[in-house]
Amino acid sequence: MTPDFEPVIGLEIHVQLKTRTKMFCGCELSFGAPPNTLTCPVCLGLPGALPVANARAIHFALMIGLALGCELADHSVFHRKNYFYPDLPKGYQISQYDEPLCRGGELAGVRLHRVHLEEDAAKLIHLGASGRIHGSEQSVVDFNRGGTPLVEIVTEPELRSPEQAREWLTLLRATLRSLAVSDVNMEEGSLRADANVSLRAAGSSELGTKTELKNMNSFRFLERGIAAEIARQRVTLEAGGSIEQETLHFDPVSGEITSLRSKEEAQDYRYFPEPDLVPIATTVAMLRAAREAIVELPRARAERFEDEYGLSVDSAHLLAFRFELANYFEKVVAVREGIDGQQIANWLTQLVARIGDQDPAQSKVTPEAMAQLVELISARAVSAPAGREVLDVLVREGGDPASVVEQRGLGALHDEDGALEAIVGQAIAADPAAVQRVRGGNDKAIGALVGAVMRETRGRADGADVTRLIREQLGI
Amino acid sequence: MSGLIDLSASQAAAAIKRGEVDPGALFDLYRQRAATDSLNAYTWVAEQAPKAPPQPSLGGVPLAVKDLFCTEGVPSQSGSRILEGYRPPYTATVVERLAQAGAPLLGKTNQDEFAMGSSNENSAFGPVLNPWDRARVPGGSSGGSAAAVAAGLAPWAIGTDTGGSIRQPAALCGIVGLKPTYGAVSRYGMIAFASSLDQAGPLTRDVSDAALLLSHMVGERDPLDATSLDFPEPIAMPSRRTLAGIRLGVPSELTGEGIEPGVLGAFQATLELARQLGATVESCALPHAPHALAAYYVLAPAECSSNLARFDGVRYGYRAADPDDLLSMYERTRHDGFGVEVRRRVMLGTYVLSSGYYEAYYGRAQRVRTKIAADFAAAFERFDFVVMPTSPCVAFELGSKLADPYAMYLNDFLSVPASLAGIPALSIPNGLASPPGGGTPLPVGFQLAGPAFSESQMLDVAFALEQALGFDGRAVRS
């Protein structure tokens, strides 16, 4: 009998801070500027240049530490992490080692190991068909990104599934976004995640050998990459093999996992305290400023959504853990007083199903249109299925729901003018078998008749109306 | 014109202000002398005087600058082949400040590669010769600056001191050299050797020149150097004639074994002179000083192994031709671009920082450093200054210590303790002594070390000694 395996997952997350300038020099940060235009002697690692720590970045890192419930060090030190690579102009990265700014902490039941500050490397661009280093004709360096402030967040290995890892990272992103310290955008690289993955016998408290999956650049790839690595390890272990400690790359296109380097090739980074910088002494004033800068965090926001708008726990979390969605929700709610918050939440799920991870504020559906649609549905002027059709149009073309309903004839059919009554009559006439079953006491058989009416009215009729009319006409 | 050469830098500045000397003529005179330098003291000489700021306090007295200070558009090679022809896009803070104050750049001076050496023989651009005896070294690593000032090829100069690189060449060339308190002078734009020790300072003909030059090197902290500090008060011009009330401590650990008899003799004579001037001279203890050299040769290489990692052939400087791959480019660039002493220290530093050895070497050396600083602090409770010879020997013959790195490192054992403690130290010439085995008498240096930011008082005491010593260096300025 093969033992049942349990995945153990830890995340190592890098977050680019949205400061005006770089971590150790005055160069501005800008995504997408022409290559090598935002550089200076410091971030190019020219001889004689010296780093000076960015106070704003330290402030942001303290905010993150506070938001994640970390213990903040009153004395922390920058270290040099030494290794050679063309994207590292000084031959070392200024990072933190055994005296990080923040230790411990917890988010949604997952404990954190540490949070520290460091600088980003420059960007290597591999020219050639693949865009990867293997087989490239030439590699060039863009130093614009070099020296961008990074916060590294390391979790304890307490995540248990790829889905949980993805969900947790989504919450972390919402938390960081609500702090306004980063764009936290995985596609643009302002949020990057590596995952440490291992398996162990279920119920065991010992950890298995872990592998490190590098730089998965979307939430979907993170989930798929971890799932693929768990599957790979499971196959190996079930065949009686053992896992090698190595660093891996997940290719989201092929789904393949390839080795970047093994434990034997692991570098000795020769960490030592950065002599060009003085230690960070965290003052009471710095802590106060960081505390005051923290606005509402996702968990608090979810609770407020429950209290203020009567949302269900699930809806409140769903919205609050996606910062933009929560902002959009609050805009829709604010359009009209007394509007039904839970209804809006339900319809925002429909919107998300259509626009995916896009910020709804960037979609063609304005908060006003969303509010109007929900009102039309609540007033039964539009049926739910027709409402979904209206939403399709809004997502594609924008505009206001009332006009869409008008132009496309999607208004609810009521029985006032007798039209619905006639359609119901036709449906009864067309399906005597169903009528017989209903009359015979099979209440479920009424569904077939309702369905026929709905098809005929293209969903514009109200289901409750239709059921009532059928019963009336059948005299039951 | 030759009379101009005999003016010290401060005398020349004063004469310019009185309208007696034309700064352009002064610049041309020194430019000419620097351009025809036969000591190999310069690696680059200005074509003409840069545009002077209006009414500068230093009058426009030209300045020789050690090669490792970055100077915009001017070769800044730190004595290394790996930076051959490198012209930085910016100027070091201290060079900029001095230019603004009226000390325009005269030329760049030769040095040991990346400031690693005590003889100036480790320069990719050839050794500098000692003007007192051309068969001998000028000391290092600021050997070019020291030789240029001693020989009258520059009115004054700046250099850097990591473990003695200003004081030792000043001693061997018979001039004044001062290493300020760590943090007093901005390191921004100084091509780093060992960041926690490197400090820029003046090399000058006399103590007054050192005070004048230093007064424009320190001041407000440089926002571009996180380790720089506000100097608490302006540097005072020295004027003291007696040493009444001054307490000098003589550390037994640094005034006995390993020092040439001639050097020791001159040192004892200067102590006697100090007594005659009214100072109290008593022995003091620096119990950890004998371990300073070992700690220094762990810490400085550790930092240099990291500081020199940027010289990888990717962005600037020398790159090996036709490498097979990235690794071979790194290896060959750094093998061919660095000299043997630099490679030795990079390897040493890499070793002491490596996993498993860090605590045994770097960690212990840091603790020794703390103890040495504590030794000095304890001494300064009883004494105003601690005094010792600057160098254990007078200038030695070119090539005589090259085969034995350890013998070369021993040159630093009197200067390194103050470096590790981060405190100011100054060397003044206190006479001539014959080398062991006889020969032409050569300059000897007398060293004072004081508490952090005691530069003004230290210069004042040095001035009184200087007046009484009456050292005459004119012979080598012809």
Image (cartoon, coloured by chain):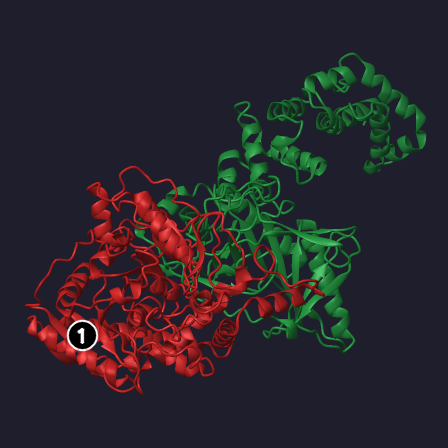
Chain colours: A green, B red
> Residue visible at 31% across and 87% down?
B437
Residue A413: x %, y % from top left: 77, 19
Residue on which the image places disc 1: B379
Local SS, label 1: helix
Tag 1: residue type?
Ala
Residue A38: x %, y % from top left: 54, 43
Above or below — where is B383 with respect to A218? below
**Residue B93 in view:** no
* Quadrant into which the C terminus of chain B falls: bottom left
How packed mark 1 is, by other alpha carbons closer than 10 Å (few <14, some 14-19, many 20 or more), is many
Above or below — where is A217 with respect to A337? below
> Residue visible at 66% across and 22% down?
A376
Nearer to us in this view, A75 or A167:
A75
Nearer to us in this view, A410 or B253:
B253
Left or right of A36? Residue B464 is left
> Residue visible at 52% across and 34% down?
A309
**Residue B283 in view:** yes
Residue B10: x %, y % from top left: 22, 52
Left or right of B153? Residue B271 is left
Left or right of A218? Residue B182 is left
Residue A255: x %, y % from top left: 78, 57
Read off the chain for label 1. Answer: B
